[in-house]
Image (cartoon, grey):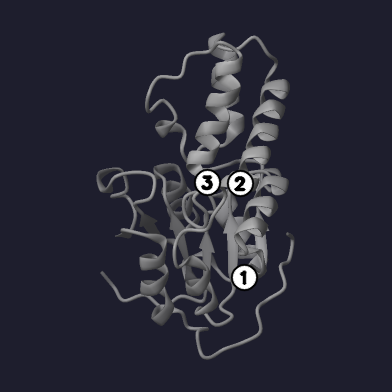
C-alpha cells in the first residue's frame, strides 16, 4: 500500500481512547435487568460503535422495555455516568502516545453525547490533547455515515484525505472510509475478521498511534498542548 503522510488524526473515543465499551454494556444491562428485559451473553457486541439512540429505537420497537425512548435513554445515561466515575480508564499508553504526537492537530469523532464524552475524557486525563470534538449532537447522520469524520476534518481545517482515523468497530471504519480518511482499526472490541475493511489493523490503540507518529507531517517537535475547540 502507498506510504501515507498525514496532517491530522481523528480518533473514536469508546474502545480507542478509553476502555468504555464494557462500561456502556454494563450500564445497559443494569437498566434492562431492572426492567425485566433479558440480556443474553454477548448481546451487546453487535451494538459496539452504534449510537445509544439506535439501540434504544430497537429496544422500544421490539417491545422489550415498557418505557418511552427518551426515558430509556435517560436511565441509561444516568447509569453510565454513575458507573464511569469508578470504572473509566484510558487504554495503556494512550496518553503518552498522544503527548508524543507533538501538537499534531487531533480531534475526537464519537457517537457519545457531549456531556458523556467530556466526562469520560476528563476522567481519563485526555481532554487537553484534542483541538476539536464531534459528538452525537453535532451531526445529522451518525456512524456508519461519513458525517462525524467530515465534520471533524472541517474543524481541524484539514481535508479528510489527509487525516488518519483510528476506530474499533465496523460502523466506525465505514464512517471514516466514506469520509475519505485512511482508517486504522484496533482490536479492542472486535476480532480481526470484523475489521478487514480498515486500511491497517493493530492490536492496541498504542500500537496504532506509534505507527502513526512518524507518518504525521506536523510531528516536527514538542509544542504546547492545544486548547480544546468545540469541546
Q: Please, is residue 62 above or below residue 133 in the view?
A: above
Q: Residues within 10 Å of mark 3 (few under 14, many from 20)?
A: many
- Whole-percent x, y for residue 1 in the image: 25, 69
Q: Quadrant of residue 63?
A: top right
Circle nearer the N terminus (1, 2): 2
Label 1 Cα crowd, 10 Å radius (few <14 / some 14-19 / many 20+)? many
Q: Please state which of residues 199 and 122 is positioned toward the viewer in this rendering.
A: 122
Most foreground residue, 152 or 33: 33
Front of the two marks 1 and 2 = 2
| Residue bearing the label numbered 1 | 129
Say what secondary structure mark 3 lies in.
loop
Residue under numbered circle 2:
86
Q: For residue 20, which numbered disc appears in the image?
A: 3
Q: Position of residue 208 (x, y in %)?
A: 38, 66
Please name the residue shown 74% across and 61% down the image: 230
User: Is 75 above or below relative to 173?
Assistant: above
Q: Earlier in the sequence, mark 3 or mark 2?
A: 3
Q: Is residue 144 visible?
A: no
Residue 186 marker: none
N-terminal of the pair, mark 3 or mark 1, is: 3
Mark 2 neighbour density, 10 Å: few (under 14) some (14–19) many (20 or more): few
Q: Is residue 134 left or right of residue 218?
A: right
Dot in front, 3 or 2: 2
Residue at x 62%, y 39% (from the top left corner): 83
Residue 66: image location, x then y, percent = 64, 9
Marks 3/2: CA–CA distance: 11 Å
Amino acid at each position: 500500500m502507498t506510504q501515507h503522510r498525514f496532517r491530522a488524526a481523528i480518533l473514536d473515543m469508546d474502545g480507542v481512547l478509553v476502555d468504555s465499551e464494557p462500561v456502556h454494556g454494563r450500564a445497559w444491562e443494569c437498566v434492562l435487568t431492572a426492567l425485566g428485559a433479558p440480556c443474553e451473553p454477548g448481546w451487546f457486541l453487535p451494538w459496539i460503535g452504534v449510537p445509544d439512540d439506535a439501540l434504544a429505537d430497537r429496544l422500544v420497537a421490539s417491545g422489550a422495555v415498557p418505557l418511552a425512548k427518551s426515558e430509556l435513554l435517560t436511565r441509561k445515561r444516568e447509569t453510565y455516568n454513575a458507573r464511569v466515575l469508578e470504572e473509566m480508564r484510558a487504554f495503556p499508553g494512550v496518553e503518552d502516545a498522544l503527548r508524543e504526537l507533538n501538537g499534531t492537530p487531533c480531534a475526537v469523532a464519537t457517537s457519545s453525547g457531549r456531556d458523556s464524552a467530556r466526562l469520560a475524557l476528563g476522567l481519563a486525563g485526555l481532554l487537553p490533547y484534542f483541538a476539536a470534538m464531534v459528538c452525537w449532537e453535532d451531526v445529522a447522520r451518525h456512524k456508519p455515515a461519513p458525517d462525524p469524520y467530515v465534520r471533524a476534518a472541517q474543524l481541524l481545517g484539514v481535508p479528510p484525505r489527509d487525516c488518519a482515523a483510528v476506530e474499533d468497530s465496523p460502523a466506525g471504519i465505514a464512517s471514516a472510509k466514506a469520509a475519505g480518511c485512511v482508517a486504522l482499526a484496533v482490536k479492542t472490541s472486535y476480532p480481526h475478521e470484523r475489521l478487514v475493511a480498515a486500511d491497517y489493523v493493530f492490536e492496541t490503540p498504542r500500537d496504532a498511534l506509534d505507527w502513526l507518529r512518524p507518518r504525521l507531517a506536523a510531528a516536527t517537535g514538542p509544542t504546547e498542548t492545544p486548547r480544546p475547540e468545540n469541546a
